[in-house]
Image: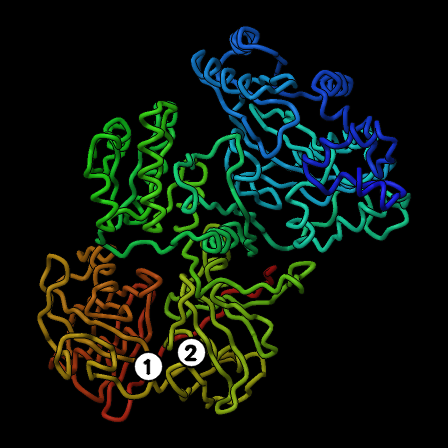
Amino acid sequence: MHIVEVEKPFGVVVAFGGQTAINLTHGLKEAGIRILGTSAESIDLAEDRSRFDALLEQFGIRRPKGMTVLDTEEALKAAEALVYPVLLRPSYVIGGQNMTIAHSEDNVRQYMDIILAQGIKNPVLIDKYMMGTELEVDVICDGTDVLVPGIMQHIERAGVHSGDSIAVYPPYHISDKMCTQIIDVSTKLALSLGTRGLVNIQYLIHGGELYVIEVNPRASRTIPYISKVTGLPMVDIATRLMVGASLSDMPYGTGLYKQPPYVTVKVPVFSFEKLRGVNSALSPEMKSTGEVLGVGKTLEEALFKGLLSAGFRLTPPAKNSDSGVLISVNKQDRFEIIDLARKFDELGYRLYATDGTAAEIERLGVDVEVVGKLCDDPHVLELLEGGKISYLIMTGTTEPKYISDFIRLNRRALQLSVPCLTSLDTANALADMLASRFNEQNTELVDIAHLRTERERIPFAKMQGSGDDYIYFENFDGRISCPESLSITLTDRHYGIGGDGIVLIGNSNIADAKMLVFNKDGSESKMAGNCIRCVGKYLYDRGIVPKKEMTIETASGIKDLQLYSFGGQVRSVRVNMGKAGLHSSDIPVLLGCDRVINHTVKIADGEYAINCVNMGNPHCVVFVERVDRVDIQNVGTLFENSPIFPQRVNTEFVRVVNRNTLKVRVWERGNGETLACGTGACAAVVAAVENGFCDKGVDVTVKVRGGDLVVNYTDEAVYLTGGACLVFNGTVEY
């Protein structure tokens, strides 16, 4: 009021000051100060439980059943009538302060004793707690028209404060019908409240029905987040509406605003490592101290960026590593733990669990090591101190002994940079993101100041060489800036185009064209014998390089191509793959010898005679009696990630049919088993010649699952001949 006396303002704005400013509204009004934007009367309508319930009833809008109480006995009766669990909170609270979920009479008594001791005069609100999907909507209204910038969906279910939830925009798992209903209800509420400016509405979807949790007649913490990703200046628009402008005077329209071509996530940041004795378990009371924004083409990419920026370690374990996940959940969460445990097991993590949780996990038929109760068993801290735990997943009880023990364990985990997850929804999102293959090298850098307003439409060709199918893009203009991310998204055979990788064809200063190849996991391949043949066909058939002898620049050097056409189109191509690299440093392989030919090594529990060859990519060739009997999924992974191959390795399992024929199965690093591998076929022939199984300077037919390749190994070079086929042309939105 001293400031008001000095400044003598025309009016004051309370909409941008959070709940603190909203709580000042009555005092300002009584002092005769004009409230700009939404009136004090409308603010009270949103904050007063009985008045707001009447408004919802007028429109037939659901909300969780609730009551207001003033003492402990009333609270117990209300909780019994609503049926446990219930949500308790004082009215006019900030950041969910003093909010809790009560599961029993003891919980209610304990809560009310604490609340009444603080001398709170406003009624305590008791709502039926409904476990469902929570959503959040920011609405701009001028009293006549409504503009909805977007709908955000929380990853964590209801019961976790919105400030502590990971919020996804646009919603990732809500039907169009439900989104339409949300827009309709939001419009009715904003107009009936007489909103001028911003209003924040929180919803719950439970049992397929939409419920209103609360309406905040003010800006929320999501405003800067949504403003950035939509390009909509929400604060500027709201301020203009507060002083008399209307939406019809502005170029933004009404209804749902145009959605951006990105998925964005808001991830909370916590400071528990700086606060001793704090219970970090997520609850209705807000505990985060900041947030970060992740932007990507998919939910997994955006979530990777958000979690990484929030301080999570996000590297899946290597095969047979000691990295593990410790899981301890309460009884009501045990029925949900099986799917989560399966995800982490498939990612290669070792599983540790307390006895009750372990009993549920064992139903999967996976190995789980049982640890004692957290408060009794020192083995848990030993695992943590020994670096055996990558993530803690804990949803405990409200027992004081458990809480104090959890705080102690969680604090040590924070000191060791081990994330502790207290929500199964967050843990599931983390597991899905880890399985998506995104990492720091294959995510697109997005300029927040120059976001695309719509998806780019990029033409592509699906081409095949001996069963290897890749997605080919012209990139002469350089507009594809992050092929690594594009490869992960499009090569998925269920949700993308499907392929063994992507190929970019671009300009070269030293050859007719340049080829870049990216595997399914986004890693770059220096060479691909089947792909380079398809690149030659692509360039010739489209008239880009109209000659049958051409050169292609690759990451492993310039390659010469001889094209063979029939009926005006290229059918097969011969490629000079260059000299074979046989020195250990060429691979590289760490065995302390100059060349690795028929060298016995131990990989995991088996002994193998290996042959190492570099044909632009590193290869390990193993001769076997029956290639069809090789457990390539397991053995190939062991070879790929063996410590003797510091840059990972492709592995070929080869049977010598005769001096002119080999039968080969291929395990490619980053791709798994593929139908063919051009450089792998070359490596197999080189190894066969070096072992005396085949002759140098003679055509050798290599039979792979996708067809036949012909390889000729000479002192000067290795020549690869095979088919090239166009499967189809298309356009993809990027």
Residue at image x 51%, y 38%?
Answer: 287
**Distance CA(mark 2)–CA(mark 1):** 9 Å
| In this picture, residue 30 sits left or right of residue 566 | right
Residue at image x 50%, y 20%?
Answer: 114
Is residue 663 or residue 14 the one in the foreground?
A: 14
**Residue 644: quadrant of the picture:** bottom left
Seen in the picture, residue 48 relative to 412 is either above or below; the reply is above
* Residue at which label 2 appears: 533
Seen in the picture, residue 562 relative to 267 is either above or below; the reply is below
Is residue 238 or residue 182 the one in the foreground?
A: 238
Query: Is the C terminus in the top left, top right, bottom left or bottom right quadrant?
Result: bottom right
**Residue 280: quadrant of the picture:** top left
The answer to whether marks 2 and 1 mark residues whose Cβ atoms lie closer than 8 Å is yes
Residue at image x 32%, y 87%?
Answer: 578
- Report x, y in % for residue 212: 66, 26
Q: Residues within 10 Å of mark 1 (few under 14, many from 20)?
A: many
Residue at image x 31%, y 32%?
Answer: 405
- Report x, y in % for residue 379: 19, 39
Q: Amino acid at mark 1?
A: Leu
Residue 174 badge: none
- Report x, y in % for residue 727: 49, 65
| In this picture, residue 153 sits left or right of residue 25 | left
- Report x, y in % for residue 142: 85, 39
Q: Amino acid at mark 2?
A: Arg
Look at the numbered disc 2 and give the secondary structure of its residue.
Answer: helix
Is residue 294 or residue 12 the one in the foreground?
A: 12
* Residue at which label 1 appears: 720
Q: Residues within 10 Å of mark 2 (few under 14, many from 20)?
A: many
Seen in the picture, residue 351 relative to 458 is either above or below; the reply is above
Query: Is the N terminus in the top left, top right, bottom left or bottom right quadrant?
Result: top right
Label 2 or label 1, whichever comes before in sequence order: 2
Seen in the picture, residue 719 relative to 37 is either above or below; the reply is below
